Amino acid sequence: MMSTTKGQTNKSVKDAKGLPVGIQAPMFKAIDADSTTFYLKDALKDGPVVAIFYRGAWCPVCNKHLSTLQDSLLLIEAEGARVIAISPEKPDYLKKMVKKTKAKFTLLYDEDYKIANAFDVTFKPSRPQLFTYNVILGADLKNRHSDRSQRLPIPATFIIDQNGIVIWRQFDPDYHNRSTVKDIIEALKKSKNK
């Protein structure tokens, strides 16, 4: 069962490792921008799920990444997959992200960082990072998230097959490095040929 554990609050970006390929993904549920409950277990009945962790609507790199995914969404869906994007931001901010990126895929609220913790992507930014995010970029993490710890997910992408297994991932502590549509599609095609 997914839970927030002490000790993860102050985990550094170097300590988060991300779920490895080949293991069972945690079956989670979360609410979307419209407060509708999404169940991973149910979504997998229709095909693989591309799960993307992003930092928030305040993050210019996240905005660009989700916009690019939206631009190529039909190509990903043509491989039988569904795209979801997961953030610790409350539903009102998910709605802002939908407006910014025109996202037609599901954006989920990761309340209490339960999903990010289960996928081992949660970390506590340094003080200089928090200054940049909150003051320069206007992130207001204490109010946008479910608690005041100001933790964030490492932006990462996991492809989960219909058996619930992580079959591919893009995981890089450098938030500039994100999954590409090309890599996602290639991974989906490769999984079909197995």
Image (spheres, rainbow, N blue to C red):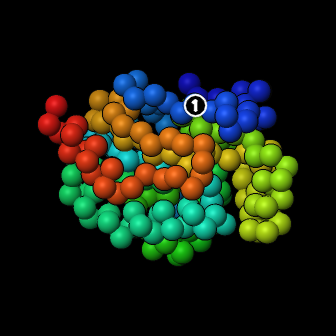
Horizontal and vertical percent position of residue 120: 58, 32
Q: Residue at x 79, y 61 (%)?
A: 132
Give 168 or 151, whichever is nearer the viewer: 168
Q: Is residue 164 visible?
A: no
Pointer 1: what residue? Answer: 17
Q: Where on the picture, by quarter, is residue 58?
A: bottom right
In the picture provided, is 119 more to the left or to the right than 56?
left
Task: Please provide percent x and percent y for residue 32.
Answer: 51, 56
Q: Residues within 10 Å of mark 1 (few under 14, many from 20)?
A: some
Query: At which x and y percent is residue 35?
Result: 54, 58
Residue appearing at x 53%, y 75% in the figure: 99
**Would residue 139 be visible to someone looking at this image?**
yes
Choose between 118 and 129: the one closer to the eye: 129
* Residue 137 falls left or right of residue 24: right
Q: Amino acid at mark 1?
A: Lys
Q: Is residue 99 above or below residue 47?
A: below
Residue 165 image offset from top left, x and y in percent: 35, 29
